Image (cartoon, grey):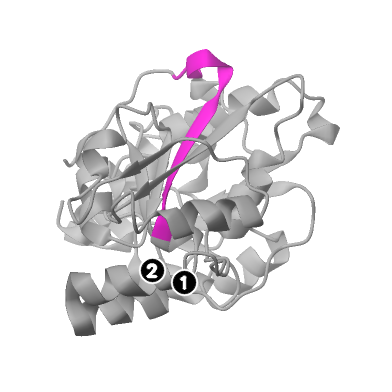
Amino acid sequence: MNRLEPENVRLQDARLVVVISSRALFDLDESHRIFEQGGEDAYSRHQIEKEDEPLAPGVAFPLAKKLLALNSPETARVEVILISRNSADTGLRVFNSIRHHGLDITRAAFTRGESPYRYIGAFGAHLFLSADAGDVRKALEAGIAAATILPSATGQNTDGQLRIAFDGDAVLFSDESERIYAADGLDAFNRNEAEAKDQPLLGGPFRPFLAALHEIQSGYPANASPIRTALVTARGAPAHERVIRTLRSWGIRIDEALFLGGRDKGEFLKAFGADIFFDDQTRHCESAANHVAAGHVPFGVKNNT
């Protein structure tokens, strides 16, 4: 799983499809502790006893809400689908919580303890978000953009615009250049990028998702889009040029590009107002999670893949 070169993406049925696990959408920490301490029977009793008590929003809840807000009575641009290791019986609390919070989610898969990742592709997902790192890895292996949601105490960005930030190498792009950095250091990396500035980078696991966002953005004037994207990368000059030329060759718009030259990303993501940030390195995700929601993408040389 070292290299990806996704094909150009067209939205199936003109919709962006995002699949989110119940533990990412809602705060199920208490329920998960009961499962770990008391097993499946104790967990089932707890969920059934509490099924009329709505679950509190989880880390991915604000993102899901903003994604669904892109829809209108005339046009359904986004579908959010729930997957869960709950049974249909214990999952009733999750559906009741969806109704309570007014989320327009109608499709779901409940797999009673089994990994639900096998249904992600069947739903036609462009993005999968989960608290389970194993399911995320399997989705990435199947060629689907996926990230493990990190715990975050940050509040919702109240700006009505959906703001999504991406790392570059091993997220939007392949890890081909990051492998040179890992093997030979920064100087070799910069030399390679300067020499290859006219050679587009291969696509990474999140290229199709960015392309799907770009397709939605293309239906709006540039100054009135409900979506804003940012590239937030540790790259600096001279490694910036290859990135810019790569995005140009893809025909994909990125609204903001921050070339930080190794600076910590957290404060910049807070300034951007990201609803979520995707990065392949755990340390960058943990820094980001102090300010915004963050998803770890376990792909590429930094993750031994």
Please tell me whether residue 83 belongs to the stretch shown in magenta.
no
Q: Is residue 21 magenta?
A: yes
Q: Residue at x 43, y 68 (%)?
A: 285
Residue 260 can be seen in this image: yes
Residue drawn at x 60%, y 23% as measured from the top left: 215
Reply above or below: 116 against 250. below
Going by the numbered disc 2, the residue's amino acid type is Gln
Which residue is more in the foreground, 56 or 151?
A: 56
Looking at the image, residue 231 lies above or below residue 211: below
Cα distance in 3D space between marks 1 and 2: 5 Å
Horizontal arrangement in the rendering, residue 304 relative to residue 258 (left or right) = left
Q: Residues within 10 Å of mark 1 (few under 14, many from 20)?
A: some
In front here: 45 or 147?
A: 45
The residue labelled by disc 2 is 47
Crowd band around label 2 with a 10 angstrom C-alpha radius: few (<14), some (14–19), many (20+): many
Residue at which label 1 appears: 50
Q: Position of residue 160 (x, y in %)?
A: 79, 50
Q: Amino acid at mark 1?
A: Lys
Q: Which residues are magenta?
A: 9-22
**Local secondary structure at mark 1:** loop
Q: Secondary structure at mark 2?
A: helix
Picture residue at 60% right of the left edge, 74% below the top = 291
Q: Quadrant of residue 207?
A: top left
Q: Is residue 230 left or right of residue 241?
A: right
Q: Position of residue 87 (x, y in %)?
A: 28, 53
Q: Are marks 1 and 2 in contact (CB under 8 Å)?
A: yes
